Amino acid sequence: MKCFSFKRFANVARWDLSVNSKFYTRSAVMMMAFISTPIVLFYLYNMLTKGFLLMGNTSDNVESFAMTIGLIGLAYSVISAGYMFHNLLTKQGRISELTLPATNLERFIWHAVVILIGVPLVFFCGVVVADFLHFLFRLMITNADIQSLTAAYYWGEGDFSNWHNYSPGFEDFMEDYGYELVTTIFIWGACYTRSFSLFNAWKYKYNIPITFLFYFILWTVLPLVLLFLGTMLFSKENVLDFMNWIKDANPHNIIIGVGIVGILVYIGIWLLTYRLYKRAQLTTKRNP
């Protein structure tokens, strides 16, 4: 077994960036355009209809923009993960990648670097570009109360991320368990995103629709099946006892336990993805 070589790894990176330069450039430009589009359309519409005066001088809608950008970023992360092994989409691409003078681990790590570092970097640049456009439009309207869209998104300086605006019970819960809960949600969100890379290693074409179909079955059909089996196998008293156990359990322990399970699932997804990638062949029944 060959040891990991940074020289071979750098050669893989150089080859991929040169061969797929148009693909990466086009993806980055489209990402920045998608992030900037809501801001441009919003301000152009208000300026053309002369309705921008309704926004006032003390509000610049930075919270709404940040939430919209967050949804776009989620979609971008999912699609990028689904194209992690885009070189394997065609037979010629498989020949080019699988015959590179590098080990499977070196090629796989490069794809992981693109997904884990390249994609967030492009997204951050897109947020900065959108922030600059937001700044320019606000200057055209009024120079009062111009908030940073970048700060609102990444550091939560907008009202949308302040849980003190919600009910007292929710505020107390978030004060006690907020950081653990947010971390656990982030872990499982990462598992969700990485699963698209897993399906991409298993199926090179149409893998994204297949992944969505998998989650549709997982989130809709499977719960109904489990509910049906639960009513058949367990009595009402058993279900009530379980619900009471959940109610009396320490939320901190439950959140930590779910987070630990999420970490194990995340590691398992990466290991299984690498295992499938190592078995990549020029043609198979699943990937002709």
Image: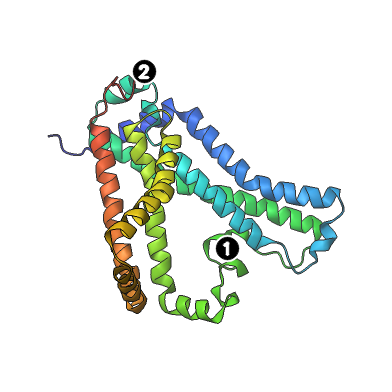
Q: Position of residue 59 (x, y in %)?
A: 73, 66
* Image coordinates for residue 272, horizontal then vertical, percent: 25, 42
Badge 1 marks a residue whose secondary structure is: helix
Q: How many marks?
A: 2
Instruction: Name the residue at 31% across, 69% down.
Output: 256
**Residue 276 in sight here:** yes
Q: Residue at coordinates 51% horizontally, 44% vertically from top-left?
A: 76
The image shows residue 26 at horizontal and vertical percentages of: 54, 33
* Camera sees residue 7: no
Q: Residue at x 47, y 45 (%)?
A: 77
Judging by the rendered image, the residue that carries numbered circle 2 is: 92
**Residue 27 vs residue 16, the one in the foreground:** 27
The image shows residue 264, relative to residue 2, as above or below, that is below
Crowd class of label 2 (few under 14; some 14 to 19; many from 20; radius 10 Å)? few
Could you tell me the amino acid type at mark 2?
A: Gln
**What residue is rendered at 34% in x and 42% in y?**
112
Cα separation, mark 2 vs mark 1, equals 44 Å
The amino acid marked with disc number 1 is Ala
Q: Which residue is mark 1?
A: 151
* Residue 275 placement: quadrant: top left
